[in-house]
Amino acid sequence: MNNKPIGIFDSGLGGLTVYKEIKNILPNENIIYFADTKRAPYGGKSKEELKVYSKDIIDFLLEQDVKIVVIGCNTISSNLYNYLKNDYKIPIFELMESAIEESLKFSKKGIGYFATSSNIKSGVFEKGIKKISSVEVFKKACPLFVPLIEEGFTDFKIVKPVIIHYLKNIEDNIDTLVMGCTHYPFLVDSIEKLVQNITIINPAKSAAIKIKNFIENSDILNTGKKEKNIFYTTGDNRKFEILAKKLIGEDCNVSTVVL
């Protein structure tokens, strides 16, 4: 079982931020990455639609004999994590818990939470904070971020006015800003140019540490041959290859599949 791959899935390119962190901390692990670009973005989809999409993908990953599944999409995590965790026997990981824990390590004043509309509506992040702390959460749905990133528009001059728009009315009230969608870390460099004295949280980093600890403690660390990581998409594989190279600097040989 040790050489079985880790399965990661997302609606598109955003989960590559999770892929990157896991690859960095577990360099010998084999990884399968699945991007449901044909049905993206997930942010405005109903819970029932998201349930169908996530089960389609997890079933596909199980056919590829993965040893764990990582939800590289916080819209899925916030709406369906408990449902999926209970419906499958395979270990499933998400990033919401890490987002909550990391933000509380740094915030004394207020927490800003950038996420998709569906993620915001779920209330999972805010409820998680309130169970532990009285720090106020300032939520902001950012529907333009994902389409911009999925089209490769991450240059500062392009995203600057959009970031300014989303920071309006919350910037003065926060000392921590959580990237509540796995796409958003691709915009961190641009966000940092526009804020002062605000710590930006990418939950993928602490989530990767938890995944590493689990794999080591479960004695399923890959001790065999490191294979080439595999990428699948439901959309245009060539477009995905080009944008992935731009975002993570890695050549990805991507195959298109029909679910």
Image: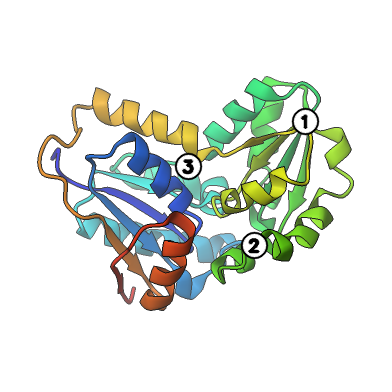
Q: Which callout, 3 or 2, points to the residue nearer the camera?
A: 2
Image disc number at residue 197: 1
Kindly identify which residue carries mark 2. Answer: 155
> What x and y, as percent, mark residue 181?
59, 50
Relative to 206, 230 lies left or right = left
> Which residue is situated farthest in the left direction here?
224
Q: Is 253 above or below relative to 97?
A: below
Image height of 256 relative to 105, above or below: below
**Residue bearing the label numbered 3:** 82
From the top left corner, tell me how far across and down residue 249 is, in percent: 41, 57
- Residue at x 71% of width, y 48% of height: 191
- Looking at the image, tell me whether mark 3 or mark 2 is earlier in sequence order: 3
In terms of sequence position, does the residue under pointer 3 or pointer 1 come before the other? 3
Residue 44 visible, this angle = yes
Residue 255: % across, % down:
29, 72
Quadrant hosting residue 154: bottom right
Residue 226 appears at what percent x and percent y? Answer: 16, 46
Query: Spatial distance from mark 1 to mark 2, Cα to Cα?
Result: 23 Å
Q: Nearer the viewer, residue 112 or 133?
A: 112
Amino acid type, label 3: Asn
Instruction: Report the quarter where the C terminus lies.
Output: bottom left
Decide which of 156, 33 is in the foreground and name it.
156
Q: Quadrant of residue 107?
A: top right
Residue occupying the point 68% across, 43% down: 123
What residue is at 77 percent from the left and 21 percent from the top? 108
